[in-house]
Amino acid sequence: MKRWMWLALAAVIVVGAGVTLVALPGGQEWTTDSPEALAAFEAGMDAQMKLYWDDAREHFARAAELDPDFVMAKLMCVDEKMKTDKAKGEALLDEVLAADTSSLTVREQFFIERARAYREERREEIPEIVDKYLAKIPNDPYVLNDKAQRAFSLGNYDEAEPLYQRLVEIAPNWALGYNQLGYINMSRGRFAEAEESFKSYRFIAHDQANPHDSLGELYIALGRYDEAEESFEKAIEIKPNFWPAYEHIALLKSFNDDLEGTREVIDRAQTAGMPESHVMALDCHEKFMALRYTRSWRNILDLAESSECVEKDDVGFPKTTVHLAACEVGDWDTALKIEQSAEDLLASIEEKGAQGRGVDSLRAAVQHLRGVRLALQGGYGEAEALLRAADERLTYIEAGSTIFKLYNRTILVELLLADGQDAAAHGLLSKVRGVNPVWVAEFQDSGFKMLGLERG
């Protein structure tokens, strides 16, 4: 099975206890003869709704252990099996797909049919399978959420938004719907509406970590940094192993030149049990940011030679920093090598049929890297076109994407000023100020310099 196939299975359903449900034929939600297995499964659904992935994994595994014939419990274990042992994961999926589904609920039959389409690489049939089910049972929140989440992941917000609005109408306690509406509003620059959505999410699920984390991401976008940190800390208070909140605090502090605070957050996360791969990523971010602040370009290139931070096949912050350092010192071969690696990664992903926000973000990163190099080589016209193209693809959704968009836009402002396009530069700067005035104030304090371009 192709990797993107089983990754898709990881998002088969996101469910939650306490949701207002429609009555399905047979009067039952999930098929098992074991009350203990059912309780474990429902606990897994509840954890998944809260985005407590580790807890959900353990509950689903326990449910499958308590009832080896619990088909849905086994399906929910496929993703974790795939991660640890692909062969065993595929064997488990084959076992699920071979099960007799005649006694299962219509919802369970739907998810088995959906999984079979992925297994047989009939991905293009998924929308039809979903719509066929919803035509019969239009208010099943599990399947409505499935359709909404697919549209959201593909970046089809015009389709996703009314689906989520309908979801929270028919299932008011389906808290994640408000979360997704908040992100959609952020992506479209509707920040007041985004705050309302996230606060509704927080009101309904105030005892969960993610509502506070999502609101904090919005506050980062708006430059309300103290409120952002307070919100992230609340998430950690509620769930000490909610790793995204630690990552967001580290991101916030590092981009505000508080590297001591960044280091403290990383140490706290490690003490709390954060997986080593996550700790390493934060370590890399902190090390490269420290050198970037002092414009120690040669040291960045030296660190890249001896560090595992840039070995991964991605275009994360360390690699973009190494690319910038190479451009700043005129090491064009290294810069071009990084650009080619990013373009190869994008091509390989597109060849597998991947779509959505992740692909758009990677394409924007490729355009950004090339734009930065051309700007520092004096090719202002080509650089402007690339940076504008990257800006069109980037949105103010989630913390990392928000910072990248702000950064790309301020580089574009610097480029326009260097190219003598003052009116266009200040027009764009005004738009950035309307989102995050703190970011613009710091940019002005730097003399409108991100790359150090000279006016032509």
Image (cartoon, rainbow, N blue to C red):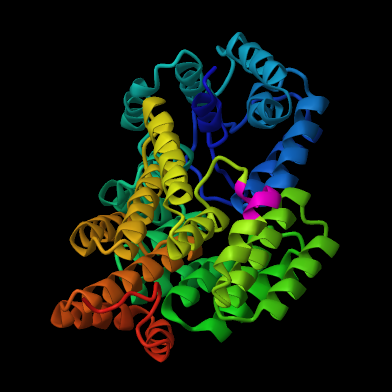
Query: Which image quadrant is residue 345 in?
Result: top left
Q: Is residue 209 visible?
A: no
Foreground residue among 292 and 124: 292
Residue 146 against residue 191 in the figure, above or below: above
Residue in the picture at 57% in, 44% down: 15
Determine the residue located farthest toward the front in the rendered image.
330
The residue lying toward the viewer, choosing from 404 and 135, is 404
Q: Nearer the viewer, residue 78 or 399?
A: 399
Q: Position of residue 396 (x, y in %)?
A: 38, 65
Residue 40 is a magenta residue: no
How many marks can you see? Answer: 0
Q: Quadrant of residue 355?
A: top left
- From the image, which quarter does the C terminus lie in? bottom left
Residue pictured at 30% horizontal, 63% vertical: 375
Q: Please give left or right for residue 438 compared with residue 282 in the image.
A: left
Q: Which residues, given as a range, are shown in magenta?
A: 304-310
- Relative height, residue 98 to residue 57 (above, below): above
* Residue 213 image point, x, y percent: 58, 67
Q: Position of residue 154 (x, y in %)?
A: 36, 42
As drawn, is 437 to the left or to the right of 107? left
Q: Position of residue 358 (x, y in %)?
A: 43, 45
